[in-house]
Image (cartoon, rainbow, N blue to C red):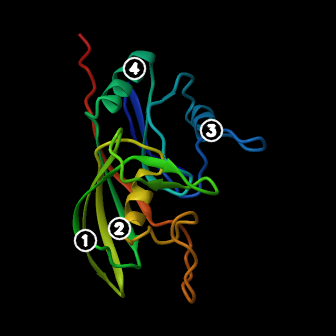
Amino acid sequence: MYRIINNHEDFLLINKSSGVIFHKGSETEGLLELLKKEAGIMELHAVHRLDKVTSGLLLFAKNIDTAKDISRQFRNRLVEKYYIALSDRKPRKKQGLIKGDMGKARRGAWKLLRTMNNPAVTQFFSCSAGNNMRLFIIRPRTGKTHQVRVALKSIGSPVLGDPLYHGKEEGLEIDRTYLHSYALSFTVRDKE
């Protein structure tokens, strides 16, 4: 379900598997509760989230001061986040910015709107990965629900295996959603 990457005195950084739910369900424990129990950490605060289908780096603060500080960095867009994704569809453009407000669509999905009142901003680069696949490196400049997934869908290259935005492909055996959070850059305050 997860692998601990860095068990720092102020934070816990894990690599979350695809398919792991973050929030507690009616029948299942959420990742936060599971981590507290299995890692033996009594105080653990979520400072950001990943969708159930997304794998990769997930950060938790081990004290309230660190939680406030890192949450402030996320809110003020000081944390750099990078994702990698695969798609079996060629994008309308190979790199650039995808900008627009996010609006609710059907069945829990979101869509990119043409308005710019409070836009999601996503930077991306893509290249061929062979076998008619496209590799994307994505840097979301904002942090909206489903932002990366909606951005790639909006340029014609939904994430391979995404149950909400991709649709089923005949003849393809897809075992997961191919979206992975692979890098985070943030600061931890010095203690004196």
Which amino acid, by three-letter code, is at mark 2?
Ile
Kindly report the distance in space between the C-alpha atoms of the residues bearing marks 2 and 1. Answer: 7 Å
Q: Judge left or right: residue 161 versus residue 184.
A: right
Mark 1: which secondary structure?
loop
Which image quadrant for residue 53? bottom right
Mark 2: which secondary structure?
loop
Q: Position of residue 27 (x, y in %)?
A: 78, 44
Dot 1 or dot 3, earlier in sequence: 3
Q: Judge left or right: residue 188 versus residue 38.
A: left
Name, please, the residue furthest toward the front.
115
* Residue of label 2: 155
Q: Judge left or right: residue 162 versus residue 97.
A: right
Of residues 59 and 87, the one nearer the viewer is 87
Mark 4: which secondary structure?
helix
Residue 34: assigned label: 3
* Residue of label 4: 68
Dot 2 or dot 4, earlier in sequence: 4
Kindly report the distance in space between the C-alpha atoms of the residues bearing marks 4 and 1. Answer: 38 Å
Kindly report the distance in space between the C-alpha atoms of the residues bearing marks 1 and 3. Answer: 41 Å
Residue drawn at point x = 71 percent, y = 42 percent: 25
Dot 4 or dot 1, earlier in sequence: 4
Which amino acid, by three-letter code, is at mark 1?
Lys
Kindly report the distance in space between the C-alpha atoms of the residues bearing marks 2 and 3. Answer: 37 Å
Question: What is the tally of numbered marks visible in this picture?
Answer: 4
Q: Position of residue 147 (x, y in %)?
A: 42, 51
Quarter that holds the C terminus: top left
Q: Residues within 10 Å of mark 2 (few under 14, many from 20)?
A: some
Of residues 106 and 69, the one nearer the viewer is 106
